[in-house]
Amino acid sequence: PTCGKFLYVTRNILDVCASFYHHLSNQKEGTYTEGFPRFARDWMAGKIPFGSPLHHLLSFAQGFNDNYYSGKDCSGYSVN
């Protein structure tokens, strides 16, 4: 085929934020010591390890504009 199919699955960002906060705040080394509201602000600003979740999502979406298939005729494929 001249066009590829992609499936990108994400979790609810609020669930990810709470889970990541508990993960980092319960580590033995490098424990995050601030409260959850500060963590959420820092995480969205990209100040926490692994960067901002929105930066990750946007960088993936940008890839569709830059990839091999951008010049191909993908009219036979639909997004459901």
Image (tube, rainbow, N blue to C red):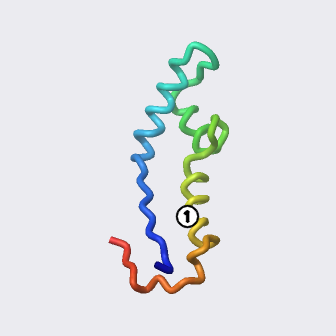
Determine which residue is flagged by label 1: 61
Q: Which residue lies furthest to the right in this view?
A: 47
| Vertical position of residue 60 compared to residue 78: above or below | above
Compared across the picture, whether 9 is left or right of 51 comes to: left
Percent across and percent down for residue 65 are: 60, 73
Left or right: 41, with 18 as reference point: right
Q: For this rendering, which residue is in front, 34 or 1?
A: 1
Q: Residue at x 56, y 32 (%)?
A: 39
Q: Residue furthest left?
A: 80
Asked whether 22 or 42 is in front, the reply is: 22
- Name the outermost residue toward the front: 1
Q: Quick one: SS at disc 1?
A: helix
Q: In which quarter of the image is the C terminus?
A: bottom left
Answer above or below: position of 5 versus 1: above
Residue under the image location 44 percent in, 69 percent down: 5
Q: As displayed, is residue 68 above or below residue 43? A: below
The residue depicted at 44 percent of the width and 33 percent of the height is: 18
Residue 8 screen position, x and y as percent: 44, 58
How many numbered circles does the render carry? Answer: 1
Amino acid type for the residue under numbered disc 1 = Ala
Q: In the rendered view, would you say 54 is above or below 42? A: below
* Residue 43 image offset from top left, x and y in percent: 59, 39
Residue drawn at x 56%, y 70% as measured from the top left = 64
Quadrant hosting residue 9: bottom left
**x then y, percent, for residue 14:** 43, 42
Label 1 Cα neighbours within 10 Å, binned few <14 / some 14-19 / many ≥20? few
